[in-house]
Amino acid sequence: MQDDSTPPVATAKATPGPWRAHQHAKGFWRIRGAPGPYFAEVDTEPDARLIAAAPALLAALEDAFTVIGEGLLLLEQEEISTEDFTDEMAGLQEQTRAVIAQAKVAS
């Protein structure tokens, strides 16, 4: 059974990020790692942007998992105030907002 304090472990490695989306002259979109060959093709820009943002989205989720877990532990042990925890969550919200925007805005 997975320990709730650690994120799930990946069994395969993904193409290292950052990933970039490029529009082909024929109109479809390609995604590639930097550096590296194209590894995906999609028909729409929103899909391309979302795929290209995957490494940053994963990193943000991993950071959120860690910050939330550490904050909850510190709250439980009364080593952090509710105000400090709230400040940490606000900072985490800003980080995740930026990554979500990256997935929605052209790169």
Image (cartoon, rainbow, N blue to C red):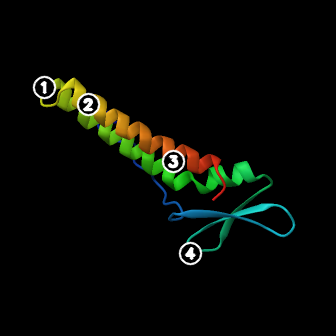
Tell me the amino acid under the disc marked 2. Phe
Quickly name the residue at label 2. Answer: 85
Compare marks 1 and 4 and give the one earlier in the sequence.
4
Label 3 to label 2: alpha-carbon separation: 21 Å
Label 2 to label 1: alpha-carbon separation: 11 Å
Measured from the top left, where is residue 74 in percent x and y?
18, 31
Q: Residue at x 52, y 60 (%)?
A: 14
Measured from the top left, where is residue 18 in percent x and y?
52, 63
Q: Secondary structure at mark 3?
A: helix
Most foreground residue, 83 or 13: 83
Compare marks 3 and 4 and give the one earlier in the sequence.
4
Label 1 to label 3: alpha-carbon separation: 31 Å
The residue carrying pointer 4 sits among few (fewer than 14), some (14 to 19) or many (20 or more) residues within 10 Å by Cα, namely: few
Residue placed farthest to the right in the image? 26
Q: Secondary structure at mark 1?
A: loop
Foreground mark, 3 or 4, reads: 3
Quickly name the residue at label 3. Answer: 99
2 relative position to 55: left or right: left
Compare marks 2 and 4 and give the one earlier in the sequence.
4
Compare marks 3 and 2 and give the one earlier in the sequence.
2
| Picture disc at residue 35 | 4
Foreground mark, 2 or 4, reads: 2
Q: Secondary structure at mark 2?
A: helix
Label 1 to label 4: alpha-carbon separation: 46 Å
Q: Are marks 3 and 2 in contact (CB under 8 Å)?
A: no
Quickly name the residue at label 1. Answer: 78
The residue carrying pointer 3 sits among few (fewer than 14), some (14 to 19) or many (20 or more) residues within 10 Å by Cα, namely: some
